[in-house]
Image (cartoon, rainbow, N blue to C red):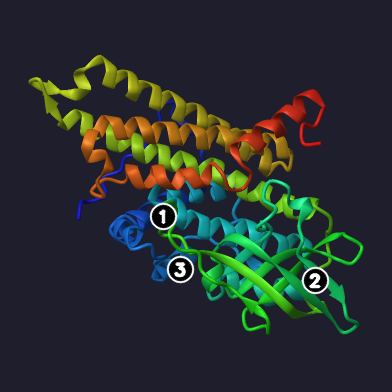
Amino acid sequence: MKPDSFKAPDYYNLDDLLSEEHLLVRSTARQWVKHHISPIIEAYAQKAEFPKQIIKGLAEIGAFGSYIPTEYGGAGLDQISYGIIMQEIERGDSGIRSTASVQSSLVMYPIYNYGTEEQRKKYLPKLASGEWIGCFGLTEPNHGSNPNGMETKFKDMGDHYLLNGAKLWISNAPFADIAVIWAKNEEGRIHGLLVERGMEGFSTPETHNKWSLRASATGELIFDNVKVPKENLLSGKNGLGAPLGCLDSARYGIAWGAIGVAMDCYDTALRYAKERVQFGKPIAAFQLQQKKLAEMITEITKAQLLAFRLGQLKNESKATSAQISMAKRNNVEMALKIAREARQILGAMGISGEYSIMRHMMNLESVITYEGTHDIHLLITGADITGISAFQ
C-alpha cells in the first residue's frame, strides 16, 4: 500500500483568501481522507462495496450538514467550508463525496428548508451524526433530464397518503434509513415526502455491475402502495422548484469536489513525471509533458477561482441556479480532461490500481452526467444568456 503523499496545488495563493476557520476545516478533512480513505479506497472500488465504517468519521469532520445550524446537529459552517469539505472528500473518491453531498444537500437541506420544526428535530440530528443515512428520489426509469414528467404519484387517503412509483440511480438507496421522495399529487403538483425504511411496500434493490462509482452504493426505490403518514409531507415548498433547489446545493458541492479529483490527478502525474526516467532524463523534462502539466495547473487554478467566487455568492444568498450550473459543468469537464491527460503521462501505470487516476476517471463519467447532464447544464447557461429556453 502506497502512502498518501498528496500535496495540493495553489498557484494563485488562494489560501490567502481563506479564513482561519476555512483552513482548519480543510486540514481536518484532508488529514481524515489521508488516513481513512486513501489506504482502503482502491480495495473497496475493486470489490464494488461502500465502506460503511467511514460513516461516523464523515460525520465527525462535518461532512453531513456542515451548513445546518448547530441546534439541529449541523456544524453551522459557511458555504465555502462546505465546498472545501466536498473538495477534500472527492480528492479521496467521488463515490464517498456522493454519500456526503446526498446526505447534506439532498436530504438535510430539504428537511431544514422545506420541513416543519417537528421534522427538523426528528431527523436532522440523526442525519448529522450519521446514525441515519438518507437518499433522494427524483430520477425515474423514464425521466432523467425531464423530472417534471415523473410518474411517481401519491393519493390523499384521508388519514395518510398512498405512494406508488419507482426511482432509479439513487445513491445511498440500498442502506438508507430515510428517503426524500418527490411525487405528484392528484392535481399533478410535485411534493416532497419522507419515506422511512420499514414502511410496508417500500423496497430498495441494489444496482450492480457498475464500472463507475464502484465504492458508492446505488439502487432503486420502489413504492408499492406505501402508506406515508401525513406528517411526513414537506409542506414548506412544492412544485419542481423544490427539488431543483436541493440540486443547486448539490451541484455547488460537486463544483468544489471535482477540483479535488483534478488536484489529485495533477499531483500524481507531476510526481510521476519527475521520477520516471526515459531517454536518460525524467519525462518531466520533455516539452510535451510540460505542456500537459502546465495546462492542468492552469485549468485547476481557473476552477478554484470559479468555485471560490461562487462560494462567496452562496454565502451572500446571491448565487443563481445558472451560475451554479456553469461551475458544475466547467469544473467536472476540467477534472475529466485532466484525469485523461494524467493517465497518459503515467503510461501503462495509469490504468493500475496502484494509482488513483483510472478510478477517478471512471467515477467522473458518472459525475459529468448526474445532478444535471453536461449538455443540460450547457442549455441552462444558454437559456440564461439568451432568455430563450431550448427545452421546449
Residue, disc 2: 233
Residue, disc 3: 55
- For residue 36, side relative to residue 275 (left or right): right
Residue 338, image x, y percentages: 40, 32
Q: Nearer the viewer, residue 7 or 288?
A: 288
Please state which amino acid type lies under the numbered disc 3: Ile
Residue 145, image x, y percentages: 68, 46
Residue, disc 1: 28
Numbered disc in front, either 3 or 2: 2
- Quadrant in which the C terminus is drawn: top right
Circle nearer the N terminus (3, 1): 1
Circle nearer the N terminus (3, 2): 3
User: Which image quarter: residue 191?
Assistant: bottom right
- For residue 3, side relative to residue 332 (left or right): left
Residue 144, image x, y percentages: 67, 50
Numbered disc in front, either 2 or 1: 2
Residue 299, image x, y percentages: 46, 26
257 relative to 296, above or below: below
Circle nearer the N terminus (2, 1): 1
Q: CA distance from mark 3 to mark 1?
A: 16 Å
Label 2 residue SS: strand
Label 1 residue SS: helix
Residue 75 in sight = no
Please state which amino acid type lies under the numbered disc 1: Thr
47 relative to 343, above or below: below
Residue 310 in sight = yes
Q: Are marks 3 and 1 in contact (CB under 8 Å)?
A: no
Please state which amino acid type lies under the numbered disc 2: Leu
Q: CA distance from mark 3 to mark 2?
A: 27 Å
User: Which image quarter: residue 104?
Assistant: bottom right
